[in-house]
Image (cartoon, rainbow, N blue to C red):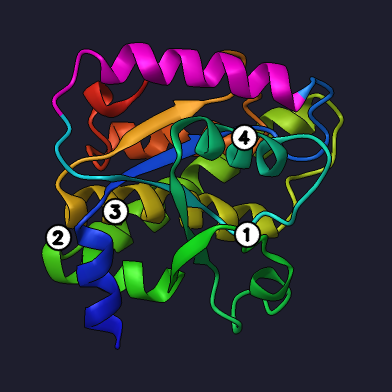
Amino acid sequence: MTQDLLFSLSQYHPVVIEGMGGYDPRDPGLVAAEVSKQLLSYWGQKQIQKPKLLITQGDPLEERGISAISPLVAARFGLSRGLVCLDEEIAEYHSPNADRDNVILEVKYSQLVDVLNHSRPGTMERLERAIDDRINRKNQKRQALDENPLKDYFRDFALLQEVTKAACSQLCKGITVAHTSSKISEFSVTGFYTVGLELGLVDPDDMVP
């Protein structure tokens, strides 16, 4: 079953959109229109043969933020969606609350971890170390600002974000990554995107400028 799922996923070109959650104050329709415009320009310079699949990471549906923006972008290009969720033993609430509208393919975080362990041994250890180090540095900054440390779940969701991109890119031989804003808070989960770039798990050319 797992191999069938992964084979099905490999037939697509994954599209990952990253950005703020429900706290994003902007109109999701306007943001989706801007992201779509950027994607159209970016894809116009690429030769992507595979059908595209917009990959989401278990965000519950909200009125604003990434879970409101992603479906609008998918609709703009007529894309189906794929879903990656954390396993129950990591976050039992994650999968049940995920938005599954228009989702045709669903995989677990652990299945993508296995892809990386098989194709790029040692990657998970490097990624976990890098994220732990980044969290420590961010918390030192927060302490200096007299702010509370990042919540424990940041580690799980930072790993989910970077494993999703790295494994999908490896499995599908390519990926498109877009952000909903050029201004990314260093204290957000999205802010961990630099870890994947620094470790060579995401090609800078696969990032929409």
C-alpha span from label 4 to label 3: 22 Å
Q: Is residue 78 visible?
A: yes
**Among the 4 quarters of the image, the one containing residue 58:** bottom right
Question: Magenta includes 29?
Answer: yes
Looking at marks 2 and 4 on the same chain, the residue that comes earlier in the sequence is marked by 4
Of residues 107 and 160, which is closer to you in this image? 107
Q: Which residue is mark 2?
A: 120
Locate residue 11 relative to residue 98 in the image: left or right.
left
Amino acid at the residue labelled 1? Asp
Looking at marks 1 and 2 on the same chain, the residue that comes earlier in the sequence is marked by 1
Task: Identify the mark at residue 72; answer none if there is no mark.
Answer: 4
Amino acid at the residue labelled 2? Arg
Residue 132 in percent (x, y) is at 50, 51
Q: Secondary structure at mark 1?
A: loop
Residue 197 in percent (x, y) is at 32, 32
What is the crowding at mark 4: few (fewer than 14 residues within 10 Å), some, or many (at least 20)? many
User: Which residue is at 27% across, 28% downward?
Assistant: 206
C-alpha span from label 3 to label 2: 13 Å
